[in-house]
Image (cartoon, rainbow, N blue to C red):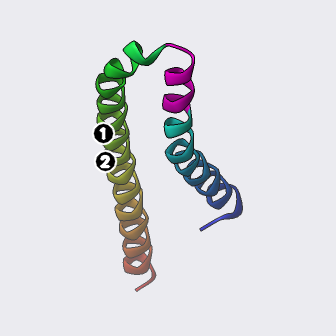
Amino acid sequence: MKGPKKFSNVVLGSVLMGLCCVVPIVLILSGTAGLAALTGYLDYVLFVVLALAIIIGLLLYARHRKQKQDICRTHEASEKRDD
């Protein structure tokens, strides 16, 4: 994995792990601020965010596989020309 791509993966992983810590803190603070009635709607928001993350992850995985297959095809084609 190349440097910038590895860095972006690390940043994305850090953000996702940070969300795991931030959500409980937001819930506790909203409860103490009198906004506990809004926490019932967070389920709907978090399910949508989870669904979007899964869809985007699957799309990125499919793109990665296609690029990998294209690289393999060009490599095989160049080997055939060399023979």
Which residue appears at 29% of the width and 35% of the height? Answer: 51
From the viewer's perspective, tell me whether residue 43 is left or right of residue 72. Answer: left
From the viewer's perspective, tell me whether residue 30 is left or right of residue 36. Answer: right
Q: In the rendered structure, which amino acid carries the disc numbered 1?
A: Ile
Q: Report the number of discs.
A: 2
Looking at the image, do the residues carrying marks 1 and 2 touch, with CB atoms under 8 Å apart? yes
Residue 33 magenta-highlighted: yes
Residue 73 magenta-highlighted: no
Res. 15 image quadrant: top right
The circle on residue 78 is none
User: Camera-side residue: 49 or 5?
Assistant: 49
Point out the stretch of residues depicted in magenta. Answer: 26-34
Q: Main secondary structure of the magenta part?
A: helix
Residue highlighted by disc 1? 55
User: Camera-side residue: 50 or 8?
Assistant: 50
Q: Position of residue 82 (x, y in %)?
A: 45, 82
Q: In the rendered structure, which amino acid carries the disc numbered 2?
A: Leu
Q: Is residue 81 above or below residue 11?
A: below
Q: Quadrant of the N terminus?
A: bottom right
**SS at badge 1:** helix
The circle on residue 58 is 2
Which residue appears at 35% of the width and 59% of the height? Answer: 65
Please rate how many residues cluster around mark 1, counting C-alpha atoms within 10 Å: few if below 14, some from 14 to 19, many from 20. few
User: Camera-side residue: 36 or 45?
Assistant: 36
**SS at badge 2:** helix
Q: Is residue 48 above or below residue 21?
A: above
Q: Position of residue 62 (x, y in %)?
A: 32, 51
Gap in Å between the C-alphas at discs 1 and 2? 5 Å
Q: Position of residue 32 (x, y in %)?
A: 55, 22
Which residue appears at 52% of the width and 31% of the height? Answer: 28
Q: Quadrant of the C terminus?
A: bottom left
